[in-house]
Amino acid sequence: MPVWQSIYEELKSENFEIISVAQDTGGEEAAGHFYDDANVTYTALIDVNHQISSLYNLVNVPSGVWVDEEGKIMRINEGTYAKTHFDGAWGTDDYVPIVRDWVAKGADSEYVWDRTKVRESIIQRTPEAERAQPAFRLGGYYFTGGNDEKAEQYWTMAQELDPTSWNYLRQDLQYEDGGSAGPEWNKRRAEIESAGGSYYAPLEIDN
Amino acid sequence: MNRKTSIAGIAAAMLISGVLNAQSATVLYNERVVELEQTLPDATDLWVKPEDLTRVNDFVLKPEGACLDALCVPVLQDRDSAMFVTRQGQAWFNVTELADKLQQAYVTDYNDGVWSFGTMPVTRQSFLRGGEAPDFELMGRDGEPVRLSDFRGKKVLLLTWASW
């Protein structure tokens, strides 16, 4: 977050905005202090219902979307990091340079995708996965109201309806033993990776 | 009181309360939580008063049908149908029937009368086919609403993250 703030400082005079959206049922209490600690001045939001992931068909965090001056998507659905963390344990140093290139060159940037590539990069949902969103929303309603039993019921339903969503799984695991990055998460991640899959959509810098 | 009488009694009581005191319901759609004082009791569907329709899903009931911007779904209002009925002079609109027609997903907690609706595919075509960024409105930390469209004319890097 401090890294994104420094990139924002560098680029904000070039008609550029960062909108950062925490996908956090826990709201201000869970996510707010991260913004405050980094003294962010870009647009910092907290999205208790995961509305942005729902609208943009995103299933994991962090994810990045480029939106141009007319509201057209230029890149979407990428595991987005400002830098590598913990000696390369996760993250990438390759993403920020392409953001700089886009801000400088706009549509002429080689990193801007064409319409077909954008369309193909939007995750398609099954009818079941479409129902996962209102199920998750219903779980959040009960969570907010203090009814943990029903929250769990509908969050479980959301995960069953859309097993591809890491957000639904990990938001729920946060409130259980082991936490959002505990044994259950590691097991699921290992299953995907041993099947040749990827936890994040791979970052495609060369295209 | 034998069992038969008691069931009949309960049914009669439900019928009366249904007519006089239509049950309340809660609707979740996008960020909104809409409390409806009265809906028409129904085992499977959500029937609301026409004046509540817009609060629930932005549709407006007009003579030509239920309309959202340029889209109008025809609804006959001079007779009963799956979408619209009149009971004792009160009109009722079937929100779940409209959702089914629009292939809008929803999940219901029938015990509590809470109806949670997903996005409407008709509002999603420009995103799914055209790669246009869906607009959104979220309440900012200062209490002021923030929309993506507020930033038209700028390049926006939209980032999701989580504390968990």
Image (cartoon, coloured by chain):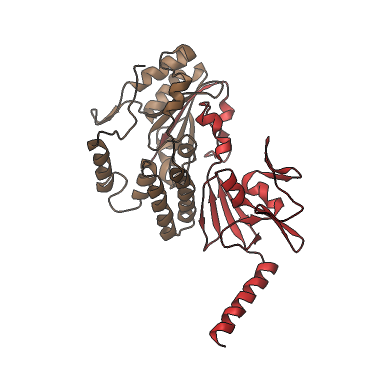
Q: Quadrant of residue B47?
A: bottom right
Judged left or right of residue A84, residue B14 is: right
Colour in which chain B is drawn: red
**So how many labels did they put on this image?**
0
Judged left or right of residue B86, residue A10 is: left
Residue shown at the point (42%, 35%) measured from the top left:
A58
In the image, residue A16 sits, relative to residue B142, either above or below, namely above
Closer to the camera in the image, A15 or A59: A59
Where the N terminus of chain B falls, by quadrant? Answer: bottom right
Residue shown at the point (67%, 72%) measured from the top left:
B16
Q: Residue B62 at what x, y percent from top left? A: 74, 44
Where the C terminus of chain B falls, by quadrant? Answer: top left
Q: Quadrant of residue B60?
A: top right
Q: Residue A12 at what x, y percent from top left? A: 49, 20
Closer to the camera in the image, B106 or B83: B83
Q: Quadrant of residue B4?
A: bottom right
Closer to the camera in the image, A18 or B123: B123
Q: Residue A181 at what x, y percent from top left? A: 29, 44
Q: Residue B103 at what x, y percent from top left? A: 55, 44
Colour in which chain A is drawn: brown
Closer to the camera in the image, A170 or B92: B92
In the image, residue A10 sits, relative to residue B75, either above or below, namely above
Judged left or right of residue A200, residue B68 is: right
Judged left or right of residue A19, residue B83 is: right
Residue farthest to the bottom, as pictured: B1
